Image (cartoon, rainbow, N blue to C red):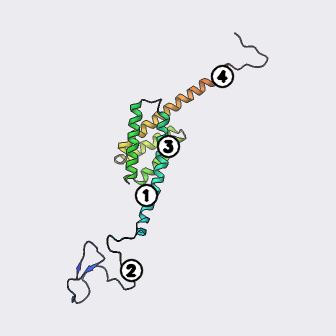
Amino acid sequence: MLLNLAFPFQTVPTSETSPGPPLMGPPPPSSKAPRPPPVGNCPASSVEPTSFPVIESEALMEDVLRPLEQALEDCRGHTKKQVCDDISRRLALLQEQWAGGKLSMPVKKRMGLLVQELSSHQWDAADDIHRSLMVDHVTEVSQWMVGVKRLIAEKRSLSSEEEAKEEKSTVTAEEHQTIPGFQQAP
C-alpha cells in the first residue's frame, strides 16, 4: 500500500493482493469508527463552528469602530477636511484588516481599551495605549494607527475648546447675576 499525501488518514492499495498491513501510516479504520466525508461534500454543520469566532470578532470590531467613527464625526466642522479624510481613510484600513483577520487578539483587546479611554475623555490613557500598540505591534498597526493618534489629538483639542467655552459662559453668567438687595454698578 502507498500513503496518500493529500489525505494522510487514507491509504491507497497498490494491488488487491498486498499481503500484510501497511508499513507506515495510521492504523486501518475500524468498522465502528466513522470515516471522514469525501472532499467537496462537507455538510454545512461542519463549517459553522469555524464561523462562530468570526461573528464574535465582528461584534467586537463594531464596538471599536463605532466610537472611533463617532469621534471623527464630532471633529468634523472643527477640523480641516483633509485631516478628517485622512483619519477616515485610516479607519477604513483598520476595518479592512480587522475584517480580514489580519489583527491579533492582543491588538483587538487593546483597541477596545483605547476606545473606552477615548470615550471617557481619558486622553493620556488612550495615548499610552496607542504608544504601547506602536511599540509592541508596529508592523500590524502602523498603517492605521497614525489616524487613531490624530483622532485622539483632535478629540482632545475639541474637548478643550468646549470646556473653555463652558467655563467662559459660566463666568459670564455669574457676572450678570444680581444679588437681591444689591444694585450693580452701571
Q: Is residue 88 left or right of residue 70?
A: left
> What residue does disc 3 label?
67
Q: Residue 173 — which label?
A: 4
For label 1, the residue is 54
Coordinates of residue 97 in the picture (x, y in percent): 37, 49
Report, in whole angstroms, how far the alpha carbon at label 3 lies from the one at label 1: 20 Å
| Amino acid beneath label 4 | Ala
First-in-chain label (4 vs 1)? 1
Q: CA distance from mark 4 to mark 1?
A: 53 Å
- Residue 81 percent coordinates (x, y): 41, 31
Q: Is residue 120 left or right of residue 105?
A: right
Label 4: few (<14), some or many (≥20) within 10 Å? few
Question: Real-space Cα distance between discs 3 and 2?
Answer: 49 Å
Tell me, yes or no, if residue 73 can be seen here: yes
Q: Amino acid at mark 3?
A: Pro
Upstream in the sequence, badge 2 or badge 1? 2
Give the residue at x 39% y 82%. 33
